[in-house]
Amino acid sequence: MAKDYAQIADAVVAGVGLLHEAAPDAMKAFGSLSTSSTASNSIDTKMKELMALAVGVAVHCDGCVAFHTKMAHQHGATRDEIAETVALAVYMGGGPAAVYGADALRAFDQFNASRT
């Protein structure tokens, strides 16, 4: 089953927008948490996006896989780095993580193809 990862990532952003309209105070707090958590301090933003991707794969979250693969790609992650991240997530998440890990590689390939 083919998935459009750009569309899934866009749906995540749109969903956050809907939540912001419905619960602005909570989403403002969530936005602050997101900004401070992904800021490049001791760990650079690319690495943090790879970490978020690993969690998304391990917890079987389509939107997380699409969004964090897109962000990792935008921050310079390579396909090999995505693959290593997926391998760690599969180790931590077992067989179901392998299915979502393959999705992360498919998502990277789609984002990489759209860049050229």
Image: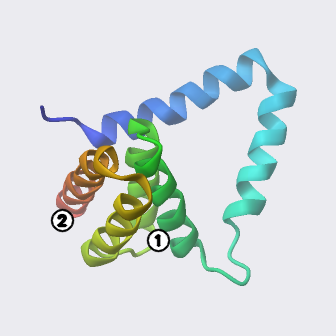
Q: Which residue is drawn at the image coordinates 38% and 46% (left, top)?
A: 66
**Nearer the N terminus, badge 2 or badge 1?**
1
Q: Nearer the viewer, residue 47 or 32?
A: 47
- The numbered disc on residue 116 is 2
Q: Is residue 14 above or below residue 85?
A: above
| In this picture, residue 3 sits left or right of residue 77 | left
- The numbered disc on residue 11 is none
Mark 2 and mark 1: Cα distance apart in space: 16 Å
Mark 1, residue position: 75
Q: Position of residue 17 (x, y in %)?
A: 62, 27
Q: Which residue is drawn at the image coordinates 66% and 63% (left, top)?
A: 38
Q: Position of residue 11 (x, y in %)?
A: 44, 30
Q: Is residue 20 above or below residue 92?
A: above
Q: Report helix, strand or loop for mark 1.
A: loop
The quarter holding residue 109 reads bottom left
Q: Amino acid at mark 1?
A: His
Q: Nearer the viewer, residue 65 or 101?
A: 101
Q: Quadrant of the N terminus?
A: top left
Q: Amino acid at mark 2?
A: Thr
The quarter holding residue 42 reads bottom right
Q: Nearer the viewer, residue 70 or 106?
A: 106
Q: Are marks 2 and 1 in contact (CB under 8 Å)?
A: no
Q: Position of residue 114 (x, y in %)?
A: 21, 55
